Image (cartoon, rainbow, N blue to C red):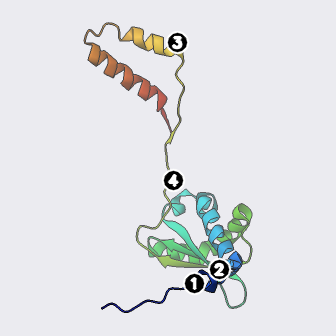
């Protein structure tokens, strides 16, 4: 025989009145959005070569009240380069490009595969005018097989619509 479970009356329930800031922690949300903005502008901050081999992963508070930027890199060479040569420039660029204030330290972690790849090609949806469609149809009128002609027409219009620019 199953034990009897006591059910709670609706009158026993208490109202939930907690501020969202207490649940999420506003400072933590600010740091997370800072990392998201930084990731979006990472190529501008460190340049394409380094951006494809590194990525910002966290902004961590320090004991003295300042912040440290944690960057994942895919090789120790880039960790040394950032640590010894670029940490000051990265902090300045983070402020100028992303308005991140309070960054005093830049740390690195080696993480294979780290990096933010920049897409080289951008697809631009093209509108095809009636005149262009008519010219295309006329150029295919010598193809006798109707199914083949239709496939060639659809392929040509898709190619025009999805023209890739580099």
Sequence order check: which comes first, mark 3 or mark 1?
Answer: 1
The answer to whether the residue labelled 4 contacts the one labelled 2, judged by CB atoms less than 8 Å apart, is no
**Which one is closest to the eye, mark 3 or mark 4?**
3
Q: CA distance from mark 1 to mark 4?
A: 57 Å
- Residue in the foreground of this view, choosing between 24 and 56: 24
* 64 or 48: nearer the viewer: 64
Query: Where 88 falls versus 64 (above or below)?
Result: above
- Residue corresponding to mark 2: 23
> Which tag is nearer the camera, tag 4 or tag 2?
2
Residue 151 location, x and y as percent?
Answer: 32, 22
Could you tell me how far apart the alpha carbons at marks 2 and 3 are, in whole angstroms? 60 Å
Which element type, helix, strand or loop, lies under badge 3? helix
Tag 4 residue: 118
**Badge 3 vs badge 4, beta-carbon distance below 8 Å:** no
Identify the residue at image location x=58%, y=58%.
Answer: 43
Mark 3 residue crowding within 10 angstroms, few (<14) / some (14–19) / many (20+)? few
Residue 27, image x, y percentages: 70, 78
Closer to the N terminus: mark 3 or mark 4?
A: 4
For marks 4 and 2, the one nearer the N-term is: 2
Q: Which residue is mark 1?
A: 9
* Spatial CA span between label 2 and label 1: 27 Å
Looking at the image, is mark 1 or mark 4 nearer the viewer?
1
> Which of these two is toward me, 25 or 39?
25
Residue 56 image point, x, y percent: 56, 70
Q: Which residue is mark 3?
A: 131
Of badges 3 and 1, the one in the foreground is: 1
Assign a secondary structure to mark 1.
loop
Secondary structure beneath label 4: loop
């Amino acid at each position: 025989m199953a034990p009897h479970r006591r059910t709670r009356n609706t009158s026993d329930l208490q109202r939930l009145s907690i501020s969202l800031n207490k649940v999420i922690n506003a400072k933590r949300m600010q740091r997370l959005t800072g990392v998201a903005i930084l990731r979006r502008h990472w190529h501008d901050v460190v340049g394409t070569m380094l951006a494809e081999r590194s990525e910002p992963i966290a902004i961590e508070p320090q004991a003295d009240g300042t912040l440290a930027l944690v960057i994942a890199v895919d090789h120790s060479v880039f960790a040394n380069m950032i640590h010894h040569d670029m940490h000051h420039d990265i902090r300045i660029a983070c402020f100028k490009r992303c308005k991140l204030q309070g960054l005093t330290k830049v740390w690195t972690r080696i993480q294979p595969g780290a990096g933010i790849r920049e897409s080289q090609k951008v697809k631009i949806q093209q509108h095809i005018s009636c005149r262009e469609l008519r010219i295309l149809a006329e150029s295919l009128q010598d193809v006798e097989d109707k199914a083949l002609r239709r496939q060639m027409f659809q392929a040509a219009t898709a190619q025009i619509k999805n023209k890739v620019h580099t």
